[in-house]
Image (tube, grey):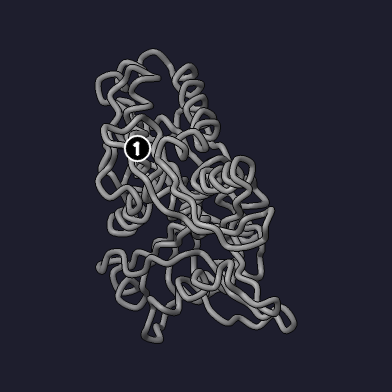
Amino acid sequence: MGFFNLLSNDIGIDLGTANTLVYVRNQGIVLNEPSVVAIEKSTGKVLAIGSAGKEMTGRTPGSIAAIRPLKNGVIADFAIAEKLIADFIRRVVKTKLLMKPRVVISVPSGITEVEKRAVRDSAENAGAREVYLLQEPMAAAIGVGLPVEQPSGSMIIDIGGGTSEIAVIALNGIVNDTSIRVAGDELSDAIIMYLKKNYNLLIGELTAEEIKIQIGSAFPLDKELSLDIRGRDLVAGVPKTLKLSSVQVREALSETIDIIVEAVRQALERTPPKLASDILERGIILTGGGALLRGFDRRLRQETNLPVNVAEEPLLCVARGTGKVLEDFPNYVQVLEKSHRD
Protein backbone atom coordinates (compact mmCIF):
# COMPACT_ATOMS: atom_id res chain seq x y z
CA MET A 1 0.00 0.00 0.00
CA GLY A 2 2.70 2.47 1.07
CA PHE A 3 4.82 1.78 -1.99
CA PHE A 4 1.89 2.31 -4.35
CA ASN A 5 1.06 5.55 -2.58
CA LEU A 6 4.48 6.90 -3.51
CA LEU A 7 3.89 6.06 -7.13
CA SER A 8 0.38 7.40 -7.51
CA ASN A 9 -1.22 10.73 -6.80
CA ASP A 10 -4.64 10.35 -5.20
CA ILE A 11 -7.16 12.99 -6.17
CA GLY A 12 -10.49 14.13 -4.73
CA ILE A 13 -12.87 15.90 -7.11
CA ASP A 14 -15.88 18.02 -6.18
CA LEU A 15 -17.49 17.85 -9.60
CA GLY A 16 -19.97 20.69 -9.45
CA THR A 17 -22.50 22.16 -11.85
CA ALA A 18 -20.98 25.62 -11.45
CA ASN A 19 -17.42 24.93 -10.23
CA THR A 20 -15.10 21.96 -9.98
CA LEU A 21 -12.55 21.73 -7.16
CA VAL A 22 -9.68 19.28 -7.08
CA TYR A 23 -7.89 18.10 -3.94
CA VAL A 24 -4.53 16.30 -4.21
CA ARG A 25 -3.46 14.08 -1.30
CA ASN A 26 -0.78 15.73 0.86
CA GLN A 27 -1.23 19.02 -1.00
CA GLY A 28 -4.78 20.21 -0.32
CA ILE A 29 -7.11 21.98 -2.78
CA VAL A 30 -4.99 22.82 -5.81
CA LEU A 31 -7.63 23.75 -8.37
CA ASN A 32 -10.93 25.64 -8.27
CA GLU A 33 -12.32 26.43 -11.70
CA PRO A 34 -15.73 26.97 -13.32
CA SER A 35 -17.17 23.79 -14.91
CA VAL A 36 -17.26 25.34 -18.38
CA VAL A 37 -15.80 24.20 -21.70
CA ALA A 38 -15.69 26.48 -24.76
CA ILE A 39 -15.74 24.62 -28.08
CA GLU A 40 -15.72 25.47 -31.75
CA LYS A 41 -19.13 24.39 -33.04
CA SER A 42 -18.12 23.31 -36.51
CA THR A 43 -15.22 21.06 -35.48
CA GLY A 44 -15.99 20.29 -31.82
CA LYS A 45 -12.45 21.43 -30.99
CA VAL A 46 -11.94 22.51 -27.36
CA LEU A 47 -10.80 26.15 -27.18
CA ALA A 48 -10.79 26.78 -23.41
CA ILE A 49 -11.64 24.99 -20.17
CA GLY A 50 -12.44 26.48 -16.75
CA SER A 51 -12.10 30.22 -16.10
CA ALA A 52 -11.10 31.01 -19.66
CA GLY A 53 -14.18 29.13 -20.88
CA LYS A 54 -16.46 30.91 -18.41
CA GLU A 55 -15.27 34.34 -19.58
CA MET A 56 -16.65 33.40 -22.99
CA THR A 57 -20.15 32.68 -21.60
CA GLY A 58 -22.69 35.00 -23.21
CA ARG A 59 -19.96 36.70 -25.23
CA THR A 60 -19.19 34.03 -27.79
CA PRO A 61 -19.52 34.59 -31.54
CA GLY A 62 -21.92 32.19 -33.29
CA SER A 63 -19.11 29.78 -34.12
CA ILE A 64 -18.13 29.17 -30.46
CA ALA A 65 -20.25 27.59 -27.72
CA ALA A 66 -19.50 27.83 -23.99
CA ILE A 67 -20.89 24.59 -22.55
CA ARG A 68 -21.50 23.54 -18.96
CA PRO A 69 -21.34 19.74 -19.20
CA LEU A 70 -23.05 19.26 -15.83
CA LYS A 71 -26.69 20.03 -15.30
CA ASN A 72 -28.25 19.71 -11.83
CA GLY A 73 -25.11 18.13 -10.46
CA VAL A 74 -25.00 15.33 -13.02
CA ILE A 75 -23.32 14.87 -16.37
CA ALA A 76 -25.51 16.15 -19.20
CA ASP A 77 -22.87 16.13 -21.93
CA PHE A 78 -20.72 13.05 -21.59
CA ALA A 79 -17.99 13.83 -24.16
CA ILE A 80 -17.47 17.38 -22.90
CA ALA A 81 -17.48 16.30 -19.23
CA GLU A 82 -14.74 13.80 -20.01
CA LYS A 83 -12.62 16.55 -21.57
CA LEU A 84 -13.20 18.75 -18.51
CA ILE A 85 -12.22 16.01 -16.02
CA ALA A 86 -9.21 14.91 -18.11
CA ASP A 87 -7.95 18.49 -18.37
CA PHE A 88 -8.25 19.08 -14.61
CA ILE A 89 -6.58 15.74 -13.76
CA ARG A 90 -3.74 16.55 -16.18
CA ARG A 91 -3.26 19.97 -14.63
CA VAL A 92 -2.85 18.63 -11.10
CA VAL A 93 -0.87 15.48 -11.88
CA LYS A 94 2.07 17.25 -13.42
CA THR A 95 4.62 14.47 -13.45
CA LYS A 96 4.18 11.31 -15.46
CA LEU A 97 3.45 8.84 -12.70
CA LEU A 98 4.01 5.12 -12.85
CA MET A 99 0.55 4.60 -11.44
CA LYS A 100 -2.65 6.28 -12.54
CA PRO A 101 -4.34 8.21 -9.73
CA ARG A 102 -7.03 6.84 -7.46
CA VAL A 103 -9.93 9.29 -7.65
CA VAL A 104 -12.72 10.05 -5.17
CA ILE A 105 -15.55 12.03 -6.79
CA SER A 106 -18.47 13.59 -4.94
CA VAL A 107 -21.91 13.08 -6.50
CA PRO A 108 -25.43 14.26 -5.53
CA SER A 109 -27.24 11.81 -3.28
CA GLY A 110 -30.23 11.62 -5.65
CA ILE A 111 -28.12 10.39 -8.58
CA THR A 112 -29.29 7.38 -10.66
CA GLU A 113 -27.23 4.29 -11.54
CA VAL A 114 -26.94 5.51 -15.15
CA GLU A 115 -25.66 8.89 -13.96
CA LYS A 116 -23.17 7.17 -11.62
CA ARG A 117 -21.85 5.16 -14.55
CA ALA A 118 -21.40 8.36 -16.59
CA VAL A 119 -19.30 9.92 -13.81
CA ARG A 120 -17.21 6.78 -13.36
CA ASP A 121 -16.62 6.23 -17.08
CA SER A 122 -15.65 9.88 -17.54
CA ALA A 123 -13.07 9.66 -14.77
CA GLU A 124 -11.68 6.31 -15.96
CA ASN A 125 -11.40 7.51 -19.55
CA ALA A 126 -9.73 10.67 -18.23
CA GLY A 127 -6.98 8.57 -16.62
CA ALA A 128 -8.16 7.36 -13.20
CA ARG A 129 -6.98 3.96 -11.95
CA GLU A 130 -9.82 3.44 -9.47
CA VAL A 131 -12.90 5.56 -9.04
CA TYR A 132 -14.81 5.89 -5.77
CA LEU A 133 -18.05 7.83 -5.45
CA LEU A 134 -18.82 9.81 -2.30
CA GLN A 135 -22.25 11.31 -1.71
CA GLU A 136 -22.07 15.09 -1.58
CA PRO A 137 -23.78 15.62 1.80
CA MET A 138 -21.46 13.01 3.35
CA ALA A 139 -18.43 14.74 1.75
CA ALA A 140 -19.63 18.11 3.07
CA ALA A 141 -20.17 16.69 6.58
CA ILE A 142 -16.68 15.15 6.64
CA GLY A 143 -15.23 18.39 5.24
CA VAL A 144 -16.87 20.44 7.99
CA GLY A 145 -15.47 18.04 10.58
CA LEU A 146 -18.73 16.48 11.77
CA PRO A 147 -18.31 13.16 13.60
CA VAL A 148 -20.05 11.12 10.87
CA GLU A 149 -19.09 7.79 12.46
CA GLN A 150 -20.97 8.48 15.71
CA PRO A 151 -24.53 7.33 16.42
CA SER A 152 -25.70 10.90 17.13
CA GLY A 153 -27.28 12.62 14.14
CA SER A 154 -26.10 15.67 12.24
CA MET A 155 -28.04 17.59 9.61
CA ILE A 156 -26.28 19.17 6.70
CA ILE A 157 -27.69 21.29 3.88
CA ASP A 158 -25.42 21.65 0.88
CA ILE A 159 -26.68 24.15 -1.69
CA GLY A 160 -24.59 23.99 -4.83
CA GLY A 161 -25.08 25.28 -8.35
CA GLY A 162 -27.34 22.48 -9.57
CA THR A 163 -28.64 20.63 -6.52
CA SER A 164 -29.58 21.25 -2.91
CA GLU A 165 -28.78 18.27 -0.72
CA ILE A 166 -30.42 17.96 2.67
CA ALA A 167 -29.21 15.00 4.71
CA VAL A 168 -29.23 13.57 8.20
CA ILE A 169 -26.06 11.63 8.88
CA ALA A 170 -25.25 9.09 11.61
CA LEU A 171 -23.05 5.98 11.91
CA ASN A 172 -21.21 6.58 8.59
CA GLY A 173 -24.46 6.58 6.68
CA ILE A 174 -27.13 8.92 5.38
CA VAL A 175 -30.24 8.22 7.46
CA ASN A 176 -32.48 10.24 5.20
CA ASP A 177 -31.70 12.55 2.36
CA THR A 178 -33.57 14.89 0.12
CA SER A 179 -31.87 15.90 -3.09
CA ILE A 180 -33.68 18.56 -5.10
CA ARG A 181 -32.54 19.97 -8.40
CA VAL A 182 -33.19 23.53 -7.30
CA ALA A 183 -30.13 25.52 -6.22
CA GLY A 184 -27.82 28.38 -7.22
CA ASP A 185 -28.54 28.16 -10.96
CA GLU A 186 -32.28 28.44 -10.36
CA LEU A 187 -31.69 31.49 -8.16
CA SER A 188 -29.81 33.15 -11.04
CA ASP A 189 -32.52 32.14 -13.53
CA ALA A 190 -35.16 33.64 -11.23
CA ILE A 191 -33.37 37.01 -11.37
CA ILE A 192 -33.24 36.86 -15.19
CA MET A 193 -36.98 36.05 -15.40
CA TYR A 194 -37.94 38.73 -12.89
CA LEU A 195 -36.15 41.50 -14.80
CA LYS A 196 -37.56 40.29 -18.10
CA LYS A 197 -41.13 40.15 -16.79
CA ASN A 198 -41.16 43.33 -14.71
CA TYR A 199 -38.75 45.64 -16.52
CA ASN A 200 -38.46 44.22 -20.07
CA LEU A 201 -34.75 44.02 -19.38
CA LEU A 202 -32.67 41.14 -20.68
CA ILE A 203 -29.49 40.25 -18.82
CA GLY A 204 -27.01 37.39 -19.21
CA GLU A 205 -26.07 34.56 -16.85
CA LEU A 206 -22.92 36.27 -15.57
CA THR A 207 -24.80 39.49 -14.73
CA ALA A 208 -27.49 37.51 -12.88
CA GLU A 209 -24.81 35.74 -10.87
CA GLU A 210 -23.18 39.06 -10.03
CA ILE A 211 -26.51 40.51 -8.83
CA LYS A 212 -27.08 37.43 -6.65
CA ILE A 213 -23.60 37.70 -5.10
CA GLN A 214 -23.59 41.50 -4.65
CA ILE A 215 -27.12 42.18 -3.38
CA GLY A 216 -29.01 38.86 -3.17
CA SER A 217 -30.65 37.91 0.15
CA ALA A 218 -33.17 35.49 1.64
CA PHE A 219 -34.16 37.60 4.64
CA PRO A 220 -34.70 41.36 5.13
CA LEU A 221 -31.32 43.04 5.58
CA ASP A 222 -30.46 45.51 8.34
CA LYS A 223 -29.26 47.84 5.61
CA GLU A 224 -30.73 47.19 2.17
CA LEU A 225 -28.33 47.36 -0.80
CA SER A 226 -28.53 48.49 -4.40
CA LEU A 227 -26.66 47.96 -7.64
CA ASP A 228 -26.67 49.56 -11.10
CA ILE A 229 -27.08 46.87 -13.73
CA ARG A 230 -26.89 46.93 -17.49
CA GLY A 231 -28.89 44.89 -19.90
CA ARG A 232 -30.85 45.15 -23.13
CA ASP A 233 -34.23 46.83 -23.29
CA LEU A 234 -36.50 44.22 -24.91
CA VAL A 235 -38.89 46.86 -26.27
CA ALA A 236 -36.45 49.42 -27.71
CA GLY A 237 -33.71 46.85 -28.35
CA VAL A 238 -30.99 49.14 -26.96
CA PRO A 239 -28.71 48.83 -23.90
CA LYS A 240 -30.29 50.15 -20.71
CA THR A 241 -29.15 50.74 -17.12
CA LEU A 242 -31.37 50.04 -14.13
CA LYS A 243 -30.88 50.64 -10.40
CA LEU A 244 -31.84 47.44 -8.63
CA SER A 245 -32.39 47.10 -4.87
CA SER A 246 -31.87 44.08 -2.65
CA VAL A 247 -35.61 44.20 -1.85
CA GLN A 248 -36.44 43.59 -5.53
CA VAL A 249 -33.89 40.81 -5.79
CA ARG A 250 -35.29 39.14 -2.68
CA GLU A 251 -38.73 39.24 -4.30
CA ALA A 252 -37.24 37.66 -7.42
CA LEU A 253 -35.63 34.88 -5.38
CA SER A 254 -38.51 34.22 -2.97
CA GLU A 255 -40.25 31.38 -4.84
CA THR A 256 -37.01 29.45 -5.40
CA ILE A 257 -35.97 29.89 -1.78
CA ASP A 258 -39.42 28.70 -0.65
CA ILE A 259 -38.86 25.41 -2.54
CA ILE A 260 -35.56 24.81 -0.71
CA VAL A 261 -37.08 25.75 2.68
CA GLU A 262 -40.01 23.40 2.08
CA ALA A 263 -37.61 20.55 1.25
CA VAL A 264 -35.78 21.20 4.55
CA ARG A 265 -39.08 21.10 6.41
CA GLN A 266 -40.04 17.79 4.82
CA ALA A 267 -36.62 16.32 5.60
CA LEU A 268 -37.07 17.26 9.26
CA GLU A 269 -40.52 15.65 9.33
CA ARG A 270 -39.02 12.38 8.11
CA THR A 271 -36.21 12.35 10.67
CA PRO A 272 -36.50 9.71 13.42
CA PRO A 273 -37.30 11.35 16.81
CA LYS A 274 -34.04 10.24 18.44
CA LEU A 275 -31.99 11.93 15.71
CA ALA A 276 -34.30 14.96 15.65
CA SER A 277 -33.33 15.68 19.27
CA ASP A 278 -29.63 15.49 18.28
CA ILE A 279 -30.28 18.07 15.54
CA LEU A 280 -32.08 20.31 18.02
CA GLU A 281 -28.94 20.22 20.15
CA ARG A 282 -26.38 20.54 17.35
CA GLY A 283 -28.27 22.59 14.83
CA ILE A 284 -28.19 22.50 11.05
CA ILE A 285 -25.01 23.19 9.10
CA LEU A 286 -25.16 25.06 5.80
CA THR A 287 -22.52 24.45 3.13
CA GLY A 288 -22.11 25.12 -0.59
CA GLY A 289 -22.31 28.38 -2.50
CA GLY A 290 -25.95 28.89 -1.50
CA ALA A 291 -24.86 29.17 2.14
CA LEU A 292 -23.29 32.51 1.17
CA LEU A 293 -26.66 34.04 0.25
CA ARG A 294 -27.26 36.78 2.83
CA GLY A 295 -29.75 35.90 5.54
CA PHE A 296 -30.37 32.35 4.35
CA ASP A 297 -29.40 31.00 7.77
CA ARG A 298 -31.78 33.49 9.44
CA ARG A 299 -34.60 32.48 7.14
CA LEU A 300 -34.08 28.79 7.98
CA ARG A 301 -33.84 29.58 11.67
CA GLN A 302 -37.17 31.37 11.49
CA GLU A 303 -38.81 28.49 9.59
CA THR A 304 -37.46 25.57 11.64
CA ASN A 305 -36.82 27.06 15.10
CA LEU A 306 -33.49 25.24 15.05
CA PRO A 307 -29.99 26.67 15.36
CA VAL A 308 -28.52 27.13 11.86
CA ASN A 309 -24.80 27.65 11.30
CA VAL A 310 -22.98 28.52 8.10
CA ALA A 311 -19.83 26.42 7.69
CA GLU A 312 -16.48 28.13 7.43
CA GLU A 313 -15.60 28.58 3.73
CA PRO A 314 -18.78 26.79 2.61
CA LEU A 315 -17.62 26.51 -1.02
CA LEU A 316 -14.69 24.31 -0.02
CA CYS A 317 -16.43 21.83 2.33
CA VAL A 318 -17.18 19.10 -0.22
CA ALA A 319 -13.69 19.21 -1.73
CA ARG A 320 -12.15 19.13 1.76
CA GLY A 321 -14.32 16.13 2.56
CA THR A 322 -13.00 14.19 -0.45
CA GLY A 323 -9.51 15.16 0.71
CA LYS A 324 -9.99 13.95 4.29
CA VAL A 325 -11.21 10.62 2.89
CA LEU A 326 -8.04 10.31 0.79
CA GLU A 327 -5.78 11.20 3.72
CA ASP A 328 -7.37 8.55 5.93
CA PHE A 329 -8.63 6.06 3.39
CA PRO A 330 -8.98 2.88 5.54
CA ASN A 331 -11.22 4.69 8.05
CA TYR A 332 -13.59 6.03 5.43
CA VAL A 333 -13.92 3.01 3.15
CA GLN A 334 -17.47 2.35 4.36
CA VAL A 335 -18.75 5.78 3.22
CA LEU A 336 -17.47 5.23 -0.34
CA GLU A 337 -19.00 3.42 -3.24
CA LYS A 338 -16.46 1.61 -5.34
CA SER A 339 -17.27 1.81 -9.02
CA HIS A 340 -16.63 -1.33 -11.00
CA ARG A 341 -16.73 -1.66 -14.74
CA ASP A 342 -19.67 -3.83 -15.71
- In the image, residue 297 lies at what x, y percent? 33, 32
| Residue at the right extreme, as displayed | 42
Question: Which element is circle 1 on?
Answer: strand
Q: Give above or below for 146 relative to 238.
A: above
Q: Position of residue 109 (x, y in %)?
A: 52, 41
Q: Is residue 143 visible?
A: yes
Q: Relative to 312, does residue 180 appear above or below in the rendering?
A: above
Residue 258 at x, y percent in the picture: 51, 28
Left or right: residue 324 versus residue 192 is: left
Image position of 196 with respect to 223: above or below = below
Q: Answer with left or right where residue 78 lies relative to residue 279.
A: right
Number of other residues with Cα within 10 Å of mark 1, as a class: few under 14, some 14 to 19, many 20 or more: many
Residue occupying the point 43% across, 72% down? 101
> Residue 320: percent from the left, percent from the top?
31, 54
Check the image and name the residue furthest to the bottom: 96
Quadrant of the rendered image containing residue 166: top left
**Which residue lies at the image location 48% right of the left edge and 16% below the top edge?**
269
Residue beneath the point at 44% across and 20% down? 268
Give whichever of 246, 110 is nearer the camera: 246
The amino acid type found where label 1 is placed reads Leu
Between residues 313 and 61, which one lies in front from this camera angle? 61
Q: Which residue is mark 1?
A: 286
